[in-house]
Image (spheres, rainbow, N blue to C red):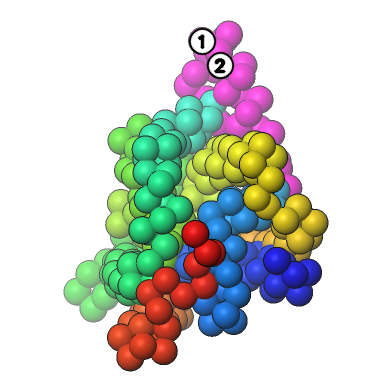
Amino acid sequence: MSWFESFILGLVQGLTEFLPISSSAHLRLTAAFAGWEDPGAAFTAITQIGTETAVLIYFRKDIARIVSAWFRSLFDKSMRADHDAQMGWLVIVGSIPIGILGVTLKDQIEGPFRDLRLTAASLIVMGIVLGVADRLAARDELGGRHRAARERKTLAELGVRDGLIYGVCQAMALIPGVSRSGATISGGLLMGYTREAAARYSFLLAIPAVLASGGLELKDAAEGGHVSWGPTLFATIVAFVVGYAVIAWFMKFITTKSFMPFVIYRIALGILLIVLVGTGVLSPHAGESAG
C-alpha cells in the first residue's frame, strides 16, 4: 500500500465511519474503483481505532462519568440505581451480540461478506430501513393535522431489552454496506428514541467492539506481519483527525435535519453498484487482495 492510498483510505474512513453510509463499504469501493487491492478487514479494524479515539475524546466527559459511576457501583449498591452506572452495564450488554458474531463469523467477514453484490444489497436495504425510521421519527416530532406531536424516548429510559436490540442492530454492521451507525440509529428510531439519543448511544456502544476488534487485528498483524505498518498508522491518524470533525458536525446536524440525504445516497450508490457489477464493469470481487 502506498502513502497516497493510505491517505485517501484514511480520509474515507474518517468521513464515513460516523455517517449512516457504511465506512467498510466505502473503503471497499474506493479500492475497487481505484483498481487498488482490497485494504482488507485488518486495515479497516486498525484505522477504526483512529476514529474511535475521536469518539473517546469528543465524549470524554460522558465516558469518564459513566466509567466512574459503573466502577463505583461494583462496590456500592446505592450507586446501582444511578443512570450513568446503568449506562455502563447497558454498553456491556449491548456489546455481547457483536462480540459473539464477530468471533464466530470471522472467516465470512473476511471472505464472502466482502462480495460487492452483497454490499450493494446492504446499502439499499438499510437505506430503506433508515428512511422508514426517519419518517416515523419526523411524524412523532411534528405531528399532523389530526395528530399531536409525540414525545420520543431519551437515554434515561434505556433498559436491558432495548440495549440488547441496539446490540443486535450493531452486529448487523459486520456485513459491509450495513453501517454501524446506520443500523443502530435506525434501531433506536424504530424503538422510539430521539435522533440525538439514538446517535449518542450508537457512538458509545461502538467503543468496546471497535477497540476489541482493532486490538485483535493489531495482535494478529504483529504476529503475521501482513500489514504495511507505516501507511496503516498514517491512515489511522488521518481517520482520527477527520473523524473528530465529522462527529462534531453530525451531532449538530441530527438535531435539526432529516436523515433523508443519507437514505437517497445509500440507495443511489447501491443501484449504481448493481449496474456496474451486472454490466461487467466491475467484478463482484474487484479490488480483493490476491489469495
Which quadrant would residue 9 be assigned to in this image? Answer: bottom right
Is 222 on the left or on the right of 97, as rendered? right
Can residue 105 be found in the magenta stretch? no
In percent of width and height, residue 66 lies at 60, 32
- Give amino acid for label 1: Lys
Which residue lies at the image location 55% right of the left edge and 13% below the top edge? 74
Q: Which mark is residue 73?
A: 2
Q: Residue furthest front?
A: 291
Q: CA distance from mark 2 to mark 1?
A: 6 Å
Residue bounds of the magenta highlight: 57-84
Which quadrant would residue 112 be assigned to in this image? Answer: bottom left
Which quadrant would residue 18 be assigned to in this image? Answer: bottom right
How many other residues sit within 10 Å of disc 2, few (<14), some (14-19) or many (≥20)?
many
Question: What kind of secondary structure does the magenta stretch mostly adopt?
Answer: helix
- Give amino acid for label 2: Ser
Q: Nearer the viewer, residue 184 or 210?
A: 210
Q: Is residue 27 above or below residue 55?
A: below
Which residue position is annotated with label 1?
Answer: 77
Q: Is residue 67 above or below residue 51?
A: above
In percent of width and height, residue 123 lies at 37, 71
Residue 75 makes an appearance in the image: yes
Q: Nearer the viewer, residue 117 or 52?
A: 117
C-beta proximity under 8 Å, tags 2 and 1: yes
Q: What kind of element bears circle 2?
A: helix
Which residue lies at the image location 58% right of the left edge and 69% below the top edge? 37
Q: What kind of element bears circle 1?
A: helix
In percent of width and height, residue 98 lies at 41, 41
How many other residues sit within 10 Å of disc 1, few (<14), some (14-19) or many (≥20)?
few
Is 238 on the left or on the right of 215, as rendered? right
